[in-house]
Structure formats: C-alpha cells, structure tokens
Image (cartoon, rainbow, N blue to C red):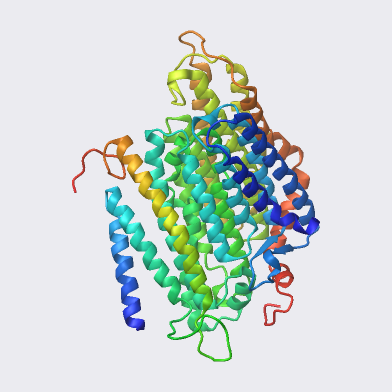
Amino acid sequence: MELLYAMTTGVLTACGLYLTLRGRTFPVVVGLTLLSYAVNLFLFSMGGLTTDGPAIVSEGTNYADPLPQALVLTAIVIGFAMTAFVVILAMRARSEVGNDHVDGKKEDRE
Amino acid sequence: MMQHLIVFPVVLPLVAGILLLYQRQGLVRYKRAVSVAATVLLLLVATGLLRQAASDQVTYYALGDWQAPFGIVLVLDRLSALMLLVTAVLAVGAVVFACAGDDEKGSNFHGLFQWQLLGINGAFLTGDLFNLFVFFEVLLLASYALLLHGGGKARIQASVHYVVLNLAGSSLFLIAVGILYGATGTLNMADMAIRVAELPTEREGLVTAGALMLLVVFGLKAAILPLYFWLPKAYASAPAPVAALFAIMTKVGIYAILRVYSLLFGDTAGGLEALEQSWVWWLSLATLAAAGVGVMAARDLRLLVAYLVLVSVGTLLAGIGMRSPQAVSALLYYLIHTTLVTGGLFLLAEMISLQRGKAGTRLVKGRPMVQGAGLAMLFFVGAIAVAGVPPFSGAIGKALMLNAAEGTQRLWLWPLLLLTSLASLIALSRAGSTLFWRSHRGNISGSPLARRQWFGVIWLLSAAPLLVALAGPVSSYTQATADQLANPQVLIRTLLPNATGDAQ
C-alpha cells in the first residue's frame, strides 16, 4: 500500500508542477489544484498509514493518528477557497487584459 | 481581564472586520469610524502588551484552555510584542490615509484591511507551526483582495503572479509542516524544539529537508533573492494604503525565519544547529546587490520605493545570517525604522502622483505641484532616513548593522551595504530633483490634498526623528529581545513546564 500511495502522490505532484509551469492561466490553475491534492495526500500519510484503526487513542495499540486528518481537513477548506479565488482572478485577467497568458502577452511561441 | 489581553490583537480585527461587512456600499462615515477606532484600539492593546512583555516574562494564552503541546497557544514574548506594535502603528497611518477616499474606490476595503491585520497579528503571536500556516493564509487571502482593490490592468497582472506564486508557496509550506510533523510528532514549536534536540540521527535528513523547505516558503514571503520577482510589480501597483500595509508583509517572513530557526535550531539542536545560516547569509548579500541595481534602474517612484523595500529585506536577512545577539538587536532596530519609513514613502508617492496629474509617479518632468514645498520637505526626510544618512534613524540602524558584523563577515557586508546605500542615495536624489526642481513647466492646477493624507504620511515618517530621539530605550529593548531569542529555554519552560530531556 505504501508504494502505491507514494507513487500516486508523486505522479500527482509531478503533473501539478508541470502544469503550474505552463504559460496559460487555465493549466496553471489546474496544476495548482493537482498540487494541492498531492499535498493533502502527503499530509495524510505523515501520521503513518494504518488500516482499520480508529482515529482515537484507545486500549488497543492499533489506532490512526487523528492529527493529520484534522490538518488535511483544514488544508482542503483553505485550498478550496483559494482555488475559487484564483479561478475568478484568472477570468478577470482574461477579460481585462484580453488574453489568458500569465504575463498578459499577446503572442508567445508555445 | 488582563490575561485575555494576548488574544485581543486577533479577536479585535476579526470582530471589526465582521461588523464592517454589514453593507457592501454606503455607510461610509460609520465604516471609517469603526475601522479607525478598531485600529487605534489595537495600537493601545499592542502598547499594553509591549509593557507586559518588557518585564522579560514570556506569557501565553491557551485557546480553550487546552494546554500545550496539545492545544493551540498564542505566545507573547518581547519579539512578538514589538512586531505587534510596529504593525499597529503602521496600520493607523495607513487606515487614516485610506479614509481620504482610497477606501471608496472598491468595496469592502475596511473589512479586508482588518482581516489582513488579523492574519498578521496572528502570525506574530502563534506558537504552533500549523497555526502559523493558517494565519499566513488569512493574511494572504486578505492581501489578494486588497491588492485588487480599485481594479485596473496593472493590478490584475501583478495579482496573477502574486496569487499563483503564493499558492505554490502554501503547498510547499504544507509539505514542510507535514515532514516536520512526521519526523518529530508534534506541531507546537516549543515542543518541537525539545524533540529536535533529542532527534535520532536517522531522522536528521528528514528534518533538514523540512526546515529548508520552510526557509523557501518564508523566503518567498520575505522576498529573498531568487524569490523576490513578484514584489516590485505587486507593491508598485497596489493602492497606496495597501502598499503601506504590505511594508510589514515582508517582515512577517523575516519574523518567521527569526522565530522558527532561533527556537528549533538553537544551540541544543546538535548537528542541526544553525542549518539555515549559510543559506540566509549568502542569499541576503545577493538580494542586497540585486536590490541596489533595481533601485538605480527604477524609473517610477513607486517602483523605486518597492526596490527600497528589497534593500531593507537584504539588510535584515544579513542580520539573521550573522546569527549573533548583537546582529539580531541591530536588525530589530532597523526593522522598526524601515517598516514605518517605507510605508510612509508609499503613501507619499501616492500624494505626489495625485498632485502631478498625468505624469503620476513616473520620474519625468511634469507640472509643478500645488503643495510642492510641503511634499518636498516630507520626501527629503523620508529619503534621508531610508538611504541611511544622518541625522535620521536609517543611519543609526545601518551603523548598528555594520557594527554587528564580525571577522570576514565585515569584508562582505560593509562594501555591499554601503554601496547599496549609495545607490539608494543617488536614485532618491535623482528622483527628488526631477519631481520637485525640474518640474516647472505648465500651470499649477489641481486641488490641495486631504488633511487625512497629510496625517497618515507625517504619522509614519515622524518615526525617523523619533527613533533617533528614543534610540537609547529602543535599542536597549531590542538588545533584551535578542538575548531572549538567543535563550529559547525560557520560552520552552514557560510553555511546557513538565517537559523532560536534555533541553532543560
């Protein structure tokens, strides 16, 4: 499970990073979203991966660390708000500048 | 009542911001009254907290009475109290200036302004690494909206860069926090300091990676060399009161570097001690050099001031890079000076552009100004202070920095700092003579400036002579702050009285 999990996170990060480095705002927004998904997965795994463990410390030794789950929840909420904001900003930039390049250039050699 | 005072700098702007959301448009007078009253109250609270912190005691506020390391704590020591006071003083100047009419160019200015203060104050007070992330997000989200206040092509362009970069930075912040949590098992910074001191060697690499990633994030906020390219454009296109408030934003990054690395990687950290030092030192020197070039090349007054912010960032980071109590004391003195004076200069640039009409802040010949004499006097004071020429505070701040350098550090810092000061001096005198002396063609037209704008600028720029007059008490306070930072055990023992291990 660890290997699959690590590979998923890695692929998501790589795709997010690639898209973030593109020149148009839409791929950049999608890239940032992917990056935040990867970060959420990464944060979640930081308490160690457990299966069938309750998220509270009880008598049993097998429990899931509840803190990363709380952190991920916070990160999701913040990331959601930020994505909404950046989408609106990209649309405003598109209408004000007249094109969707991140630098507002008319032409580029892509 | 008194023990709840620590939470006030967070709660007060939050409540004020909510009240100010009541109507999007209209009720201008009431909104201004609420916003100014809340900011002045914040100044009083910050003064009270400073007096409390000056007793050399570290006090903390456990939210919901959940004790550290499990609950979230707000920690008040000399450093955070000082930063709170500087923020409040800056905010009073900026908000009064905004009341002259800038707040009506878009909606919800005052509410967002208060929330920006909430984020900044929270970042200065929190003792928890994840909470620091949350407050960073609060201040960033407010700053995104404030940067766009009033709209316009240049602002939207600068915002796109600023927002995208900071979103990437937030992701990196979360990764770094995750790594540090995974390696140490705690998020409370005091507790983490104890865990780092007892860290098994196989986890040192993990903690180093996490810590250096944090440095990238804080460096992005502080605008250190490879990460500063967003700053000049964003600051130059922001509305004046917002740009003035942004003068503290780079200092949030510097505060975070100072706090996190002096606490976590102090002299108990063993092999990880001072792991950020060489990075910060060399990059700060490079930032200084680049900022000096930028100052000389700027063809617009706002852009010039934005590069002056970068000069101050380089100087402050060099102080962190030296990592001695003397250097930290010098950098804190310089930080008070540079925050208030560059904030004042942003406001002054706006006033100059209002009087010049079409020429704006571009450094070209234009028509003479109605109130040219008054503006020229203020510009003179601000320019002398920020370039570091006696008799104002910049000179003392830079002298303290130069004095704090030791051995080979002098070899690098002295020429670079003095040359960038010279570059600032040349650029500012060129700007001043173009704006005030060579602009005499055409007729004087335009209306005089609002009294609130004059108040805002004079309020901030009066820091330059005042910091000289009060140099004795201020520098003894910063010296004590540096000593407190160099000895984080006091903070750790206050937060975690039952902690065991060799950190005690």
Query: Which residue appears farthest toward the left when viewing the image?
Result: A109
Q: Quadrant of residue B134?
A: bottom right
Query: Which residue appears farthest toward the top when viewing the image?
Result: B443
Which percent across, then down, holds residue B344? 60, 34
Which percent across, then down, holds residue B455? 66, 28
**Looking at the image, is A57 positioned above or below residue B89?**
below
Q: Could you say which is closer to the camera, residue B14 or residue B196?
A: B14
Image quadrant containing the N terminus of chain B: bottom right
- Residue B125 appears in the picture as rendered: yes
Query: Which residue appears farthest toward the bottom when viewing the image?
Result: A60
Q: Is residue B419 left or right of residue B469?
A: left
Which percent across, then down, holds residue A6? 35, 77
**Looking at the image, is A73 positioned above or below residue B195?**
above
**Looking at the image, is B90 positioned above or below residue B225?**
above
Q: Residue at x 31, y 76 (%)?
A: A7
Q: Could you say which is closer to the camera, residue B126 or residue B352?
A: B126
Q: Is residue A16 left or right of residue B442?
A: left
Q: Residue at x 60, y 81 (%)?
A: B198
Q: Is residue A23 left or right of residue B396?
A: left
Q: Could you say which is closer to the camera, residue B91 or residue B308?
A: B91
Q: Residue at x 28, y 64 (%)?
A: A15
| Total marks placed | 0
- Residue B389 appears in the picture as rendered: no
Image quadrant containing the C terminus of chain B: bottom right
Q: Residue at x 51, y 22 (%)?
A: B354
